[in-house]
Each structure stands twice: as structure tokens, then as C-alpha cells.
Image (tube, coloured by chain):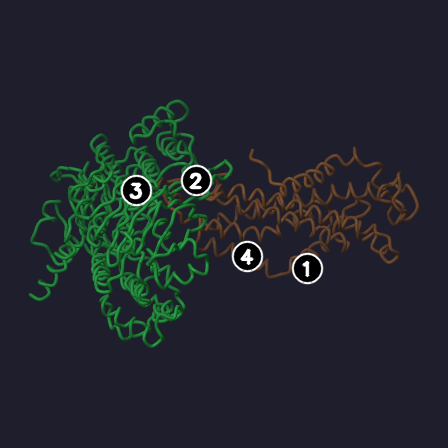
Chain colours: A brown, B green
């Protein structure tokens, strides 16, 4: 391992913090997730570090559980969007011709509809459960990944080493996973950081609009929605999830930047 | 030496290196080089890549390219040290007193502006000449450099003229401000031999007529011998030998210079053709998808087992397309390919694994022919696994054997391509082709991206391997010297047709057709006065017609 630059170390620290908190939520949270433990919108105190929410639940507890839901959904949707998006993108690049046309035009069609509106329409007719949410978000977002993966793979596909593999008689699986994928990884990893953050924002937006995670389950967007009325009275409860989203976004991107720098050395090196 | 126009004293140049996995390091790439140049003289800087020749050339403009810095020494031009003048001094100097001709004129011209505007820009900007006079000068220079319609040539855009013409336009650009020194950085390297000779003659005449001093940077000793008065041989940032052109060519003192002069001394005895050729290409006509014209017209050649067929021609002659047709990447419109006694399917998809195994290919750019994220062991090992199902110990043993054959140790197994030199990369590509135990290998310009001495090593290796493995080579090249060294038979291609075909001795002995004559006479020879002889010969011929 090389020396980690300061910015990346900061990013790594906060990202790890959020993910650990998400994983160990039941151990860390001081109270039960939906347990009413105090008055409405109590200020922060020794017993309630971040105060209480609009119906008197402990806000820190809600934040920890909310982070768990948000991060889990965002991660699962990102993984889904990357596997479908990049595999289809690579396939389109390698196959070319009508297969490429078919896939690319289908993706264009999906992309021509604003994804938030599309998601709202789909979720209003489907039961809003966590798997459905992940599926909808992941598939909608995979169109962006498809575009990137296809563009990168088209460039790599014309390199002499891919031609050499074709002349050897290699199958598509080897060409996609052994020749193209390792060389396309850098831009994809960088994009993954960015996409993860968009997913966090996406699920938060859906929850804020009431079509995402359903109460009493907590998630960051939902917490903003529950506590938004407090802002009028100078209650900062709604700003705390916003702050969490912002710090998570920045730290994940710092890490992604560093990974990108590390894997693209001047000599086209290796990661 | 007070009257020297350019006086470089103990020049040291440093750069920052980024070795993989280590912190950046400051390294010295030119270690104290000194030379002088008088007005009207030409000094040739010669050496292989990494010798520091371009870096030294650019230092004459007080410039260090990307992360390169002049760390010590002095550069005196017209009696003042340009390194002490600061940016303002340099700005006055560049484009006025010292000008530069880049290797790739196509990349150096702005495609959005007409040539005249670009050729006269420096002269006008530096107040060397008013606009009308600068344009008049440009027209005179166009005429002198043998460009067509000198009066209107400047009205064209860069894409409207040929590569050779563009390189001459760049020379006009450099000469227009009436500089005292011109730095030529590999001005003919990117050109075909037949074009190179015209550009070379034009540059030489222009230098003589205008009386400027020039630094001529190249890796081709035969070229520099035609234009320069003195030659400095460089290696790894050090001066190896410095003397008059006559002395360097005819009486080199150092071993390294001797090696450069005597390069291409490979001897290969021509083999007679056999009754059963391993490859028989008959009547191939091909075109690229979506284009309306044929790139290959009725091409027929034979290649005999264990022999080398050289396919020669300039860029655009269709020689690489022929390789694509033979490999199946470009199915022909008509014609047939017979390989090892069976007819090959025209398209790659229709070929058996055995067809693919027996017909291997080595590429020009070893850099991009290997996956940068696979180790040497994977690159060479994959064909062993794929064609022969070798695994574990067996595979390891065969890997070692192959690495020995290409004269590299098994210490290279875990290295990545980025950790190899240019010559080593090409050797690994050769090993990858050999791993398949092929009957025939297509070598597409395999030595053109390499330095002469390294290329020599690769050619010797190929000939050696041919003897051991009895493999046939289809050798695509534009370099006649390479052909002389290794071929058994030759096909000369021009505009998609085979214009001359036969055994090496037949093709290379008179009577010649016009194109072969032009091609053969254009290859620079390592002797003084060769350029004048050729030009005189051509003038006589055209006068005779």
C-alpha cells in the first residue's frame, strides 16, 4: 500500500465511519428505532445528543437507523446499476451492429424520460417495498453506466491486444472480462463513487416525496420530511440528515478520486 | 571560438521521473554536453530514443518540454547567454533568432488557419518584416522549397496539402523570420522514403541558400549524413562522439558509433521456392465497409514453408490491408486464400481453432499489442492454455523455454508491459506468437517503431527462430534495408496492386519498373553525397524522357 494522501485519508475515515455506523446500528443506537422517549423537538442534551424529533423519538437513533437504510438501498442499487449497465455496455461495444443499435436506442428511450418522474410513476403503481425501490433505482441508473461503459469499451475494443485476442479465437466472455474490464475499471470506479452519491440523493428525494422508504422505517430523506416544519420554529432537526448526506457525498468522492489517481499512472500502469 | 553563433557549454538538463510504486525522483537526463555551431553550418544530433537529442535541441530555444528543466550550463546565442535573459529575453529570441521545425507538421499546424497566416506570423509578430514583405518572403521560400503554385500555396488550409508539402511549409515557416538558427527535430521521420528524399533535398538547399545555422535531430544516421557538416552522437544524455560528418561515417572512433554505422549487416541467404507453399493468396480484391473503392486489386502471392516473403510499399499501398485479409479480419470481395493445403474461410468466424493457431501475427506497436494489465506470464501463457490446455508446471516449463528463446530470463514472468523496454516488449509479442507453434507469422512493421540497434537485434532473433522452428514470415515493411536483410521473396505493392513480385535477387536487380526504381533509389545510404547523386540521376532521367 502506498502512502495515502491527506484528502483521501479524511474521505476514507468518514466513509468508514458512516458504513460502520450503518452495519452496527442496533449496537450503537441508544434507543429503539421507533421508540418515543421524550417531548417533541427537545434540544440536544446529555440523554439525547441530537435532541428529539417531531413526535419525541431520539434523533441520533433515527439518524443511525436512517443511515443504515439509506446506505443499504444506495449501495444495493449502485451494485445493480453497475453490473447491468457495464455488462450490457461492454456487450454492446463488443457485438456492435444491430445488437449495439438495439441496446443503445432502448437506453436512449429510457434516458429521454426524466428519471425522477419515471420513478414516481412506477412506484405509484407498484407496492413500495425496499426490493422494488432498489430495482427501480438500479435499473433507471444503469442507463448512465451503460453509456459510460460502452464509450470506454468501444475505445478499448479497437486496441491491438483485443484484436490479438480475437485472432487467437477467444470468446466474448474472455474479451469482456479479461481484456476490456481491467482496462475500463478506472473510469468505472470513479463513476461508481459519483453514482453512489446520486443514489443517496435519489432515495432521499423519493422518501421526502413520500414514495420511498415508508414510516415507521427511518431514512435520511424521511427524517428531513418529518422534521421540515420545525425549521419555521428554528428547530435544526431537519438540517442534520442534510448535513450527513453532504459529508457522506464529499468523503465518498474523495476516496473515488484517490482510487482513480492510483489506478491511472502515467504509464497506463496497473491497479 | 568567439565567433560561434551557438555555443552550448556544459549543458545539464533534469526531469522528474515517476517510477511505478515509488515516490517521484529528480533525475538528470543530459549530463554536461558542450558544442559550438558557426553561422551557415549544420550540426547533426543523432542517437536512439532517450538519448536526449530532442531535449538538447529544444534547449537551444531555452525550452524544456513537460517537466524537463535546464539545470546547469550555458547556452550562448549571438554572444549572449539566453538562459539568463528571463522569459522576456526568450520571447524575443524564439521565432525570431531561433526557430523550430517539429517532427509532425500535421500536428503542429493549426487546422483552422490558412498556411500563409501561420508561415508569416512569427516574422510579423517580431517586427522582422512588415506584412507585405513577409508574404513576399514566404512565396519565395515556397518556390525555393519546390512547393506547387508558390503564389497561391499559402491560401490553402493544412488539410489541403500532402504530408511532405506540409513539412516543407513548416520549413518555410521556420525560415521566414530570417533566423540565425533553425532546430530541425526529426523533420522527415514521419514521411515515406519516396517523399522524404524531396523534403530532404529541399531543406538542404534552403539551408545553403539562406546561410542559417541549423541543428538537425534524427535517429537515422544515413539521413543526417546527407545534410550536416558535423555530427554529434549521443547516448543516454552523454556525448559519445563529435566530429565532422566525413570522420563519423568513414572513420568512427567509438564502438557505439561503429555499431550505428554498420547496422543492418545481417546476412541471409535466399532460399529457393518449394513446390507446396504454406500460404497461397490468389486474386484478392478487397475494400473497407462503406467505401466505394477497392484497396486491394487482384493480389496474388505465395509464401513457402520456413521462408520470408517481404511485402514492401509506402503508406497507403495496401500492405497492412493484405494482412487483415489474410487473418480474416477483412473478408475479401473476391479471391481465395489457401493455407497449409486447405482453403481458409474468408471471415474470422468461419475459421477453426487450428487455422487460428497456425497463423499468428506480430504488431508494429508492441505497446498496444499487449494488455497493459496482464503480466508477461499471462500474455505468453494464454496461448499455451488456450491451444494446448497446458496448466501448472507444464505451462511454467514451456513459458521458461519461450522466454529463453527470445533471450529473456524467466525473471520477466511477473512483470507488466509498462516495466519493459521497447525491444523487450516486441520480444514478448514474438514469444506470444511462437507459443502457438504456428506455421506462419505475419509481421506487420515489427521493427519500425524501434531504434536501429534494437531493431537489428529483433531481426536477428526472428531469423534465428525461423531456422529453429521452421516458421514462415509474411513480413510487411516500408524499409528496403530490412527487406534486403531477411527476405527470400519480395512483393512490391503500390496503390493496392502488386507491381513486382519474385525472389529477392530477381526483384532487387535491374531492369526495374519505374516505381521499384523510385523506391529503391529513395532509401538513404550511409555515404556522403548520396543525396546529390540521386537528385542528379533523377534530373537526368526526366531530361531524357
Q: Do tag 4 and tag 1 residues touch (Cβ < 8 Å)?
A: no
Residue B190 visible in rendering? no
SS for dot 1: helix
Mark 1 → mark 3, Cα distance in angstroms: 70 Å
Callout 3: SS? strand
Q: How far apart are marks 1 and 2 (CA)?
A: 58 Å
Q: Name the residue under label 1.
A: A117
Label 3 marks a residue whose chain is B
In the picture, the quarter occupied by the C terminus of chain B is bottom left
Circle 2 is placed at which residue position?
A: B27
Q: Nearer the viewer, residue B24 or B468?
A: B24
Which chain letter matches label 4? Answer: A
Is B223 located above or below residue A171 in the figure?
below
Label 3 and label 2 in one chain:
yes
Q: Please provide percent x and percent y for residue B333.
A: 27, 56
**Residues at marks 4 and 3, CA–CA distance in whole angstroms:** 63 Å
Q: Residues within 10 Å of mark 3 (few under 14, many from 20)?
A: many
Neighbours of disc 2 within 10 Å: few (<14), some (14-19), many (20+): few
- Which percent across, then down, holds residue A176? 47, 43
> Where does the image place residue A117, in percent across and percent down from the top left?
68, 59
Mark linked to residue A106: 4
> With A238 as the anchor, is B89 left or right in this view?
left
Could you tell me residue B512's position as x and y percent? 10, 54
- Vertical position of residue A221 compared to residue B207: above or below: above
Chain name for mark 2: B
Residue hosting label 3: B239
Q: Which of marks 4 and 1 is in front?
A: 1
In this orientation, which residue lies closer to the viewer: A110 or A229? A229
Mark 2 to mark 4 CA distance (whole Å): 53 Å
Give the label, 4 or 3, closer to the camera. 3
Numbered disc in front, either 2 or 4: 2
Amino acid at each position: 500500500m502506498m502512502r495515502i494522501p491527506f484528502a483521501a485519508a479524511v474521505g476514507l475515515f468518514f466513509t468508514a465511519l458512516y458504513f460502520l455506523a450503518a452495519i452496527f446500528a442496533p449496537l450503537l443506537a441508544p434507543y429503539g428505532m421507533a421508540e418515543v422517549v421524550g417531548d417533541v423537538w427537545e434540544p440536544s442534551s446529555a440523554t439525547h445528543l441530537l435532541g428529539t424529533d417531531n413526535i419525541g423519538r431520539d434523533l441520533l437513533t433515527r439518524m443511525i437507523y436512517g443511515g443504515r437504510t439509506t446506505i443499504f438501498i444506495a449501495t444495493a442499487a449502485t451494485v445493480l446499476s453497475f453490473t447491468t449497465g457495464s455488462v450490457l455496455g461492454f456487450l454492446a461495444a463488443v457485438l456492435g451492429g444491430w445488437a449495439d443499435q438495439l441496446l443503445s436506442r432502448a437506453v436512449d428511450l429510457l434516458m429521454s424520460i426524466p428519471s425522477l418522474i419515471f420513478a414516481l410513476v412506477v412506484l405509484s403503481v407498484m407496492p413500495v417495498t425496499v426490493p422494488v425501490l432498489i430495482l427501480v433505482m438500479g435499473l433507471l441508473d444503469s442507463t448512465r453506466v451503460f453509456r459510460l461503459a460502452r464509450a470506454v469499451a468501444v475505445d478499448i475494443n479497437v486496441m491491438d491486444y483485443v484484436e490479438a485476442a480475437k485472432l487467437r479465437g477467444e470468446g466474448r466472455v474472455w474479451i469482456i472480462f479479461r481484456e476490456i474490464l481491467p482496462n475500463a475499471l478506472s473510469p468505472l470506479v470513479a463513476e461508481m463513487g459519483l453514482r453512489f452519491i446520486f443514489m443517496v440523493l435519489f432515495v432521499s428525494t423519493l422518501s421526502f416525496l413520500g414514495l420511498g422508504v415508508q414510516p415507521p422505517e427511518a431514512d435520511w430523506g424521511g427524517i428531513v420530511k418529518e422534521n421540515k416544519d420545525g425549521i419555521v420554529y428554528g428547530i435544526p432537526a431537519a438540517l442534520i440528515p442534510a448535513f450527513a448526506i453532504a459529508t457522506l457525498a464529499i468523503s465518498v468522492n474523495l476516496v473515488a478520486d484517490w482510487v482513480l489517481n492510483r489506478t491511472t499512472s502515467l504509464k497506463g500502469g496497473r491497479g | 571560438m568567439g565567433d560561434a553563433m551557438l555555443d552550448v557549454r556544459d549543458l545539464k538538463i533534469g526531469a522528474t521521473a515517476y517510477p511505478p510504486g515509488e515516490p517521484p525522483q529528480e533525475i538528470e537526463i543530459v549530463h554536461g554536453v558542450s558544442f559550438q555551431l558557426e553561422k551557415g553550418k549544420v550540426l547533426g544530433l543523432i542517437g536512439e530514443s532517450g538519448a536526449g537529442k530532442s531535449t538538447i535541441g529544444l534547449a537551444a530555444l531555452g525550452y524544456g518540454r513537460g517537466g524537463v528543466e535546464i539545470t546547469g550550463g550555458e547556452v550562448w546565442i549571438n554572444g549572449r547567454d539566453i538562459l539568463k535573459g528571463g522569459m522576456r529575453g526568450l520571447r524575443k529570441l524564439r521565432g525570431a533568432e531561433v526557430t523550430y521545425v517539429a517532427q509532425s507538421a500535421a500536428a503542429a499546424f493549426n487546422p483552422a488557419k490558412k498556411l500563409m497566416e501561420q508561415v508569416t506570423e512569427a516574422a510579423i509578430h517580431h517586427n522582422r518584416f512588415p506584412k507585405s514583405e513577409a508574404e513576399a518572403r514566404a512565396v519565395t521560400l515556397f518556390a525555393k522549397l519546390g512547393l506547387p503554385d508558390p503564389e497561391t500555396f499559402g491560401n490553402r488550409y493544412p488539410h489541403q496539402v500532402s504530408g511532405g508539402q506540409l513539412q516543407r511549409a513548416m520549413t518555410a515557416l521556420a525560415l521566414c523570420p530570417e533566423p540565425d538558427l533553425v532546430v530541425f527535430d526529426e523533420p522527415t521521420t514521419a514521411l515515406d522514403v519516396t517523399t522524404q528524399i524531396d523534403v530532404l533535398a529541399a531543406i538542404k538547399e534552403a539551408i545553403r541558400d539562406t546561410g542559417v545555422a541549423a541543428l538537425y535531430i534524427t535517429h537515422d544516421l544515413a539521413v543526417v549524413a546527407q545534410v550536416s557538416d558535423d555530427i554529434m552522437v549521443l547516448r543516454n544524455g552523454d556525448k559519445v562522439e563529435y566530429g565532422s560528418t566525413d570522420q563519423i561515417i568513414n572513420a568512427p572512433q567509438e564502438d557505439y558509433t561503429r555499431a550505428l554505422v554498420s547496422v543492418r549487416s545481417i546476412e541471409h541467404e535466399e532460399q529457393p521456392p518449394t513446390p507446396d507453399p504454406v500460404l497461397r493468396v490468389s486474386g484478392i480484391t478487397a475494400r473497407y465497409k462503406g467505401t466505394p473503392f477497392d484497396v486491394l486489386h487482384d493480389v496474388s502471392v505465395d509464401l513457402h514453408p520456413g521462408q520470408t516473403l517481404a511485402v514492401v510499399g509506402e503508406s497507403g499501398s495496401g500492405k497492412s490491408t493484405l494482412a487483415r485479409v489474410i487473418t480474416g479480419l477483412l473478408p475479401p470481395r473476391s479471391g481465395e486464400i489457401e493455407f497449409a493445403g486447405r482453403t481458409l474461410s474468408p471471415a474470422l468466424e468461419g475459421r477453426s481453432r487450428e487455422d487460428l493457431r497456425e497463423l499468428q501475427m506480430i504488431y508494429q506497436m508492441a505497446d498496444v499489442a499487449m494488455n497493459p494489465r496482464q503480466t508477461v506470464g499471462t500474455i505468453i501463457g494464454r496461448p499455451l492454455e488456450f491451444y494446448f490446455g497446458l496448466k501448472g508446471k507444464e505451462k511454467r516449463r514451456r513459458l521458461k523455454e519461450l522466454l529463453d528463446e527470445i533471450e529473456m530470463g524467466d525473471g520477466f514472468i511477473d512483470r507488466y508491459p509498462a516495466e519493459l523496454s521497447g525491444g523487450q516488449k516486441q520480444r514478448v509479442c514474438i514469444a506470444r506468437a511462437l507459443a502457438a507453434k504456428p506455421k506462419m507469422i505475419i509481421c506487420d512493421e515489427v521493427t519500425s517503431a524501434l531504434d536501429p540497434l534494437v531493431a537489428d537485434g529483433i531481426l536477428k532473433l526472428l531469423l534465428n527462430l525461423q531456422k529453429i522452428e521452421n516458421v514462415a514470415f509474411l513480413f510487411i515493411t516500408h524499409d528496403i534495408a530490412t527487406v534486403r536483410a531477411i527476405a527470400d521473396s519480395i512483393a512490391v505493392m503500390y496503390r493496392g496492386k502488386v507491381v513486382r513480385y519474385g525472389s529477392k535477387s530477381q526483384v532487387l536487380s535491374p531492369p526495374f519498373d519505374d516505381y521499384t526504381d523510385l523506391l529503391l533509389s529513395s532509401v538513404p545510404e550511409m555515404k556522403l553525397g548520396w543525396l546529390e547523386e540521386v537528385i542528379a540521376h533523377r534530373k537526368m532521367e526526366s531530361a531524357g524522357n
